[in-house]
Amino acid sequence: MLRGDDDLFALMESMGDNAGYNADQQDSPPAQDPEPPTPIPSILTKTKTTKTKTTKTTKTKRKRSSSQSKKGGNELWNPSYVHHNQSNNICTSSVHPSVELLRHSAFESLKSSLLAYCTRKAPEGLKVKKSWIEEWWFGRKSEEDSVEDGYDSVMVTPTGTHNGDDDNNDRKNSSSMADSALCTSVIGSPGGKKRSKFLSGIRAIVQSEHSTFRKTLSSSRRTVPKKGPQIIPASDNSGGGGGGGGGGGGVVQVKYMGKILKLNSAYLEKLRILHERSSLPASDFNSDVFSLLLRYDTLEGAGFQASIPPRVFDVLLEEFGAGMEMFASPLNCRYSRFCSAFPDVDGVFGSAGSVWKFEPKEGCFEANPPFEEGVITRMASHFERLLKEATGDLKFIIIVPRWPDKKSWQRLNESTATRQVITVNQKDHYYCEGTRYRRGGDYRVASFDTSVFFW
């Protein structure tokens, strides 16, 4: 059972810490520690019910601040908390940097080809957004099964449809919801030959790029460089600047075969701790860091990698026992155990694997998925099944945009698993920038109201 309104007030208030700090511009310099925020209105929005309280919220926050410091958390992460699932290590191998470079190039080619195709097909005057391609990618990957022939963790599988997962009943009879969504964004909703031709073009691009990647990968395994990646400390490179609120320190460089990736030094130390706890005995730290950084650099979309503020994690852990994330990465995880999109590069840093393969029977878990309809819909089906099969007290706290006009939000709101919902107004809260591991403590003011579902 939920602990009551006071805990929910504390959660809402924590989402408003530093509210109003504007870091929407992704190319702005690293943010410094924000000024203390003005407390947000203490309004708790339940399903069909609204309550207003102010006094207890302030008292509750003051009471918890001292106890939270005992949890060992900081602005960056909480290295002290160890989830009970810590012993289940899915890591069996790591990705060689040379292979990841090939994957990066192949994915850049896929995005470029798809963007050019959509631009050609778009009506005059319509600018095709890169974010549409990112959303398409997340949607397509959520439709895939890792046992499919030709599956790759990044490159889209030509078949495009999810295969054999009982959680995915909403998709089994469609070729690709992601393809259809992209088609609608680019050319609208025409039926007949025009739509069919557009979808065929997407499939042809995916097939061609995937085939080229597999051939290149096969031929390159005979020419792996002997010298591995180098990590250059901030004091030894010209790019070392201040780190801001995301951990402080300078910016280190990770170099390999002409590719230079940047990482805030505080995050490097975080990765070192995670690696020591979770990696294979023969795993090379420098190589694993390079592959990890390149993988998330490939994704680009900072918004898709954003996370909730540290104070919210503290409340979720202390009041609800939620000490494990269902959608995270080694770079933005709050705890040393988490589910992630890329077990192949994340596993050596503590990932418990894909959320779609994670089968908890009890416990409380936080879920802040990529804000893509297909991912959210599949998550709802997956969590509903887990709740039905639970042998103990199982809970999920789901944080998503409040999109009442979209099917994915309606799916969550109308589910029998939903016990309570709160709403945080757009102007009153923020998310941690997805690229803060490179530049420091940037914050992204929310672009929409947020719904917090308690399942």
Image (cartoon, rainbow, N blue to C red):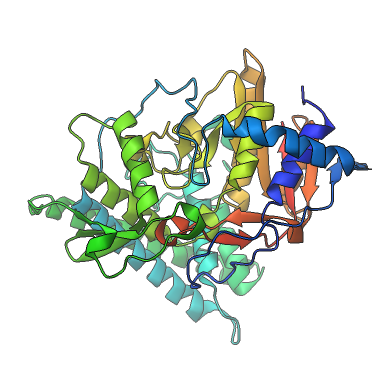
Residue at the top extreme of this rendering: 391
**Residue 136 locus on image (x, y percent):** 52, 59
Residue 229's place in the image compared with 300, above or below, is: above
Q: Nearer the viewer, residue 424 or 395?
A: 424
**Residue 198 locus on image (x, y percent):** 52, 69
Q: In the drawing, does residue 10 fall left or right of residue 70?
A: right
**Residue 455 locus on image (x, y percent):** 71, 31
Q: Nearer the viewer, residue 310 or 95?
A: 310
* Camera sees residue 154: no
Q: Residue at x 53, y 61 (%)?
A: 442
Question: Which quadrant of the rendered structure holds the N terminus?
Answer: top right
Q: Residue at x 47, y 57 (%)?
A: 436
Residue at the bottom extreme of this rendering: 124
Q: In the drawing, does residue 287 fall left or right of residue 59?
A: left
Q: Nearer the viewer, residue 351 or 125?
A: 351
**Residue 350 locus on image (x, y percent):** 38, 33
Name which quarter of the figure residue 113 lies in. Answer: bottom left
Q: Residue at x 82, y 28 (%)?
A: 4
Q: In the drawing, does residue 227 fall left or right of residue 233?
A: left
Name which quarter of the figure residue 110 lies in. Answer: bottom left
Name which quarter of the figure residue 213 lies in. Answer: bottom left
What is the tally of numbered marks visible in this picture?
0
* Camera sees residue 94: yes
Residue 348's place in the image compared with 266, above or below, is: above
Residue 247's place in the image compared with 59, above or below, is: below
